[in-house]
Amino acid sequence: MTSPTPRRTVLAAALAAAGSAAPPAVAVGAAAPATPMVRGPAASPVDNRFWNSYTDWRSGTRTGTRAVPGRRPGLAIAAPAGRTDYTDPHTGRTAAWEYASWTSPVHRSKVPATEVIASWNAHTPAGTWLLVELRGTYSDATSTPWYVMGRWAAGDVDIRRTSVDDQTDGRSTIWTDTFSIDDAASGLRLVSYQLRLTLYRKPGSKLTPTVWQVGAVASDIPDRFTVPASTPGPARELTVPRYSQNTHIGQYPEYDNGGEAWCSPTSSQMITEYWGRKPTAEDLAWVNPAFADPQVCHAARYTFDYQYDGCGNWPFNAAYASTYRDMSAVVTRLGSLSDLQTLIGAGIPAITSQSFLKEELTGAGYGTAGHLMTVIGFTADGDVIANDPASTGNEAVRRVYRRREWENIWLRTKRYNASGKVVSGTGGVCYVYFPAHPTARQRLALRSLGLL
């Protein structure tokens, strides 16, 4: 039910501060399709910016890369800008690579941010990989260094996909996949940023990665133990495949041993298959044939972060989803259950990140320092219908959770752990996967949330 705790525990310590608040209030909380609940303009503590159009790829600074036109425009290597050696810290192998790069224009965030999370969608055939970096400007006009947000490949033969630890300038730090201001109470914020893509291929080849989208969510979520209750909307439930992470306990120790560590890839696989995409029999040939639901093992392997030593890297999960035909995926933050109902109303399920004590979520039967589950709908009373992978088996995955309890544990930024210590919550973190060419109804919903 939890992803490995060291990264999230450290981030919690960095973000949490001593304080107190009253405990959250609790309200008790097959449907027909509903019209998307599109929000009107409102102030938001979240800013999304994604580069994905032909015009986007022709902007910024290109060094050896080219914009690729077509129904799904992308960025690819035109002619190598240089050659370098890379020693993989997880295999010890050193290899030579040709490279080319693209640097985005400066994006001035609508929200001076305490956190930024990048995500990307790309194709990396064997013999290629890519590097994603972020550099920003603080509110005092000084700059961050270039931070590595991920070294990524869809496969795991050429390089091992990895985050990079120990990145800090004494004012901000990269916690696996998240840029974070070290002392938010100081008032320091990140006001603008650029992203840089470096594309690598084996020397002398004509191969190239193709990046279809790169972007980031910048946010300054206010400190809160509780959040305002949203108003329930129309009931709807999507038919999403159900997979339990717990049926995989002890499988593949090299990918963090299944079970509670696989909530994120299990959730990613559920939604990928909802959209009609799944690994082929050839893709799954490496999985022990005695294991049920081998596609979940596949998702764990191909979301695994070799530095984090787990499958819970948020952008790596989104990138995995995007390796399937015509799929887009983003990591973002949403502001309320009304936002999730907008997605559900358009037929788009979502993966949410939350942490809670056992007694805070009625019917869960467990507590967690960090867990991903898939929201697939809402009851007529507004309660949350979730495919919760922390279940005994696939038949037990579908759960109904009380709206008020669920909304609070997902959106809060502070909570008390079992020892009474103040630690952090995720503040509405969410993965959203959807077709690269969504319907008009889906586009309307995604645009209303800043995701297109």
Image (cartoon, grey):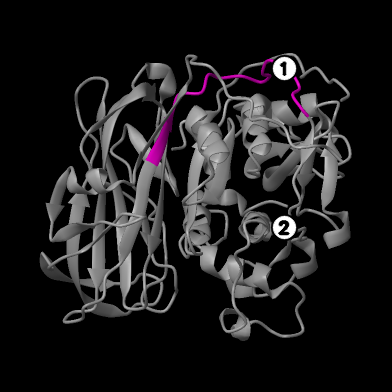
Q: Residue 267 placed where, x, y %?
A: 66, 54
Query: Does the segment drawn in magenta span residue 218?
Result: yes
Of residue 16 and residue 40, the one placed in the foreground of this image is: 40
Can residue 420 be seen at all in this image of the molecule?
Answer: no
Q: Residue 120 placed where, x, y %?
A: 40, 51
Report the number of discs.
Answer: 2
Q: Is residue 204 above or below residue 173?
A: below
Which residue carries the number 1 mark? 229
User: What residue lies at 83% left-to-right and 30% top-to-bottom?
Assistant: 402
Of tags 2 and 1, which is closer to the observer? 1
Give the amino acid type for the residue marked by disc 1 in the picture: Ala
Q: Residues within 10 Å of mark 1 (few under 14, many from 20)?
A: some
Q: Taken as a whole, is the magenta stretch helix, strand or loop?
A: loop
Q: Secondary structure at mark 2?
A: helix
Q: Residue 412 placed where, x, y %?
A: 63, 26
Can residue 285 be seen at all in this image of the molecule?
Answer: yes
Mark carried by residue 260: 2
